[in-house]
Amino acid sequence: MWARAALRGAVAGLVGVAVMTAGEKVEQAVTGRPDSYVPARTLTALTTGRRLPESARPPVRNHLMHWGTGAAVGALRGIWSAAGLRGWRASAWHTAVRLAVDQTLENVTGVGAPPWTWSRQDQVVDVGHKAVYSFATGVVADRIVPSARNGRGGRGLWD
């Protein structure tokens, strides 16, 4: 049951990444913010032990990290749904987990900077996009992962 919940959660996480990415593209069109390649630099540091220069823009690694992290953290959300941790409160907590995962990986590799050193705008943008990811992931996970408490999927966001 738990492996199935994790797999379905990973699928929900991929949906969440797609929704977040669409939102990022809209936000970037409005703000003019360029694409971030921090995910690619983080993946490189994690897998090779070397750091890419700030100017590096490897799109394949960027997508692997972006989508891979979304699926991995989505798997956790699927397990939460199965365990009965559902609805908007679980999605709010999941936002904190997603932010913590990103910040831990980015800062342990030396690629990122602590969020309190960022501009207020960058903080709002990052938290906002991660919240969109987590709430979209939660809606899907709560729909497709049966709860161990009642044996069926819930209504989603407002369970």
Image (tube, rainbow, N blue to C red):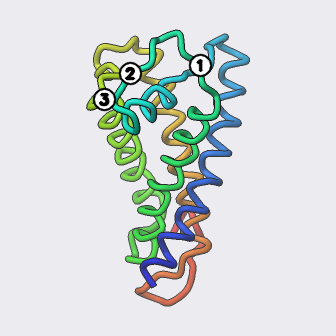
- Determine which residue is flagged by label 3: 109
Secondary structure state at the residue bearing disc 3:
loop
Mark 3 residue type? Thr
Crowd rating for badge 1 (residues with CA inside 10 Å; few <14, some 14–19, many 20+): some
Q: Is residue 98 above or below residue 5?
A: above
Q: Is residue 23 above or below residue 137?
A: above
Q: Position of residue 82 (x, y in %)?
A: 44, 77
- Determine which residue is flagged by label 1: 57
- Residue 79 or 127: which is nearer the viewer? 79
Q: Position of residue 78 (x, y in %)?
A: 48, 68
Mark 2 residue type? Arg
Dot placed on the residue nearer the N-terminal end, 2 or 1:
2
Question: Which residue is pictured at 65% across the width and 54% down the height?
Answer: 15
Residue 14 shown left or right of residue 106 in the figure: right
- Residue 159 or 111: which is nearer the viewer? 111
Q: Do the residues bearing badges 2 and 1 touch, measured as CB atoms within 8 Å? A: no
How far is disc 2 from disc 1 in space, using C-alphas?
12 Å
Secondary structure state at the residue bearing disc 1:
loop
Front position among marks 3 and 2 = 2
Q: Which mark is residue 99?
A: none
Q: Residue furthest bottom?
A: 151
The answer to which image quadrant residue 13 occupies is: bottom right
Question: Which residue is pictured at 39% across the width and 37% down the height?
Answer: 102
How far is disc 3 from disc 2 in space, using C-alphas?
8 Å
- Residue 47 or 30: which is nearer the viewer? 47
Q: Position of residue 9 (x, y in %)?
A: 53, 65
Q: Do the residues bearing badges 3 and 2 touch, measured as CB atoms within 8 Å? A: yes
Mark 1 residue type? Arg
Q: Which mark is residue 51?
A: 2
Q: Position of residue 95 (x, y in %)?
A: 42, 46
Q: Do the residues bearing badges 1 and 3 touch, measured as CB atoms within 8 Å? A: no
